[in-house]
Image (cartoon, helix red, strand yellow):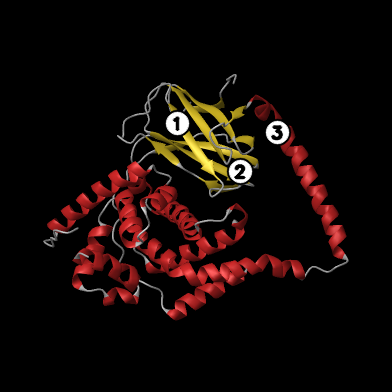
Amino acid sequence: MSKFDNEWQGLDQKIKLSKKESADLYDSIFQEVQEPNKKKSTTRLFLKPILSLVTVACIAIILILSNMNTSENKGMLTQSSNGENNNEITIIITNNATFEYYGITMNVYKDGRKISDPTVINADNTVIATGEKLHFPFIEDDFTLEGEVSLEATIVLDNENRVTIEPKIPISIEKGNKYYLSIEGDSVESSQLTIENRAE
Amino acid sequence: MDSLQHWYQKYHQNIYNYIYFMIGDHEQAKDLMQDTFVRAYHRFDSFHGGDEKGWLVRIARNITIDHIRKQKPIAFLLDRPTTLQALDKTPEQMSMLNESEKELYHALQKLKISYREIIILRKIKEFSIKETSAILHWSENKVKVQLFRAMKSLKKELQKEGYIHEQI
């Protein structure tokens, strides 16, 4: 065994949490995962059916309202089955813009909260060519791959400058599917994220 | 809950250690380790058995990469080295490292993120090529090529600092 192997092992074995830190952190984790259960148990029994009805009614209203706002977009969304892997979804963005940029950050929101924001740039730091397709694969480790999410693209112009394209696009996702979108526009100011018309 | 306790006891030092080498900040590594186990608890349904340590490291990696991306977006975007943390953000145990271990640690921190990560997984955490490829979602060939380049780059850093060893 070489001296360096000992040093790698030394690093692995010596950089550790103290017993107290380990115990304190476990208590914090335990508390954090127990928190929802505690709250649940304090709900009075007779209130439970009423709260359930109110919750169901609220969800129904939210779903109806969100369908009113987004049904047009969702109807147009192109999706196709992802034959390669049924445990992931892929968002594919085609660059149909005529201005130059270096990459895209795909911001994914669920219930108004950002849940993922991967960035794709070319490995050689070249501009994204017209017609180039950028693939954003997501797996269960990223977030739950079912239900309603909103997509937002941020254009990477260079090291310092990024521009987020509004508005967000709401979609309904399902495991195993691919979703096709497109970046269009002559300048970053006029750029748009649109759903690509594609028959597959 | 039993699994969480069992996994914590068995793997928390490994997870902390991986995150610490990635970001070089003791307090933040503790926070991210905590997030890792909380997420593992909530995502237990997506664990289909098998390599539990690899699954936990994959979660830790996602959380750590998100953290780096938020803290140092340009360095992450261009896969550049992130700056070293202040000394007061290191664990007490740093003082237990001998000189050559310290040199190695500091050289590691100067590498770009993707090189640092492959060395941590393969050399420090001793994951196999297959396990590393599963954690990073890379092909096994890419793991080998990247490790070779990373070690070359590490050697260059060590030479720059005047600490050269032939058996890297």
User: In the image shown, does A141 or B34 lie closer to the viewer?
Assistant: A141
Task: Give the CA distance from mark 1 to mark 2.
Answer: 19 Å
- Write down the residue under mark 1: A134
Question: Mark 3 is on which residue type?
Answer: Asn
Kind of residue sitting beneath label 2: Leu
From the image, tell me which residue sits under label 3.
A69
Upstream in sequence: badge 1 or badge 3:
3
Q: Is residue A23 above or below residue A83?
A: below
Q: Which element carries disc 2, helix, strand or loop?
A: loop
SS at circle 3: helix
Chain hosting mark 1: A
Residue sitting at x 53%, y 67%: B7
Horizontal and vertical percent position of residue B118: 33, 52
Residue B49 in the image, given as x and y percentages of width and height: 56, 56
Which circle, 2 or 3, is nearer the viewer?
2
**Residue A145 - label:** 2
Protein chain holding label 2: A
Which of marks 2 and 1 precedes in the sequence?
1
